[in-house]
Amino acid sequence: MPLAFLFPFSCMAIWAGNGIVSKLAVGVLSPAALAWSRWMVAALVLTPFLAHRAWRERRKLRAGFSKLAVLALLGMVLNQTFGYYAAQTLGATEIGLMMGLTPLMTVLLSIWLLRERPTWGALLGGAISILGLAILLGQGDPARLLTQGIHIGSVYMLLSAATYALYSVLLKRWDLGLDNWSMLYGQVLCSLLFLTPFYLLVDGHWPDGSALWLILYAGIPTSALSPWLWMQGIALLGASRTAIFMNLLPVMTAALAISWLGERLTSYHLIGGGMTLMGVLLAQLLVRPVTVRRRARLAVAGCQEK
């Protein structure tokens, strides 16, 4: 299908817009209120279409409830809530650049948890991305991290990227025997079980009308439509080719932040962010496994015998 790329491309555009919504919500909605209301809207939108399907799959949903709950906690609760808290102090440009680390983190966690063989791209790309991240977090001076530490907003954003990477790995590892829509709907409902008490304890105020369009964007295009676009991209292009589109997220977010929010793109954004994205891209493109040469293996074996 010639236009199949439009599915993951549109998904990335929606996610980039959600980064702008996160910034616009500062001072209008608390992170707890935005996280809860987003998934409540998604549940209301998806229920008429998916409730009957979920009822048919109720035995599988019940059997996989604990794993669905963990997935929801990582991918929908912690990932989004950390991101919304990060938006309180970080610009949308930084949010997009740091979220762009997710594919690299996914590759590294896959090596650890799924016992996948490390690749040259993961090693080389990881080193380049870490250096780029140090430049980005240190605002052009990596040594600054040693004297001033990491900004709390950056910590939240790194946790957001890490939780989504872990979510992606577990999603690949756990086969619950459910179709994608049932998985999504089950996770949305589980996320509300976590977020409702958190929202009531931390905030508890009903959002006013000025926040309605922010909630609707986060709840409908971002939470209900974009998963379908992403799944369509995987079905038509394959998982590996679709994943490459994740590299567009930082670029799209920065473009929207500059044009809509008036954020300024600095040299450390370009250098640090560029190196970070280059490392992520290398990790996805250089997939040749790291191998130990036979001669070296024999030498090691000989040393062990002695």
Image (spheres, helix red, strand yellow):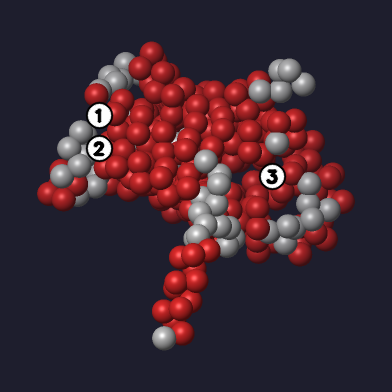
Q: Which mark is residue 184?
A: 3
Closest to the observer, 230 or 274: 274
Closest to the observer, 86 or 113: 113
Quadrant assignment, res 266: top left
Q: Name the secondary structure under disc 3.
A: helix
Of the residues shown, which amino acid type is indicated by label 1?
Tyr
Residue placed farthest to the left in the image?
147
Tag 3: Cα neighbours inside 10 Å, few (<14), some, or many (≥20)?
many
Per the model, the C-alpha gap separating discs 2 and 3 is 37 Å
Q: Position of residue 306 (x, y in %)?
A: 41, 86
* Residue occupied by mark 2: 135
Residue placed farthest to the right in the image?
56
Q: Disc count in the image?
A: 3
Q: Label 1 near label 2: C-beta < 8 Å?
A: yes
* Residue occupied by mark 1: 268
The residue depicted at 49 percent of the width and 68 percent of the height is 297
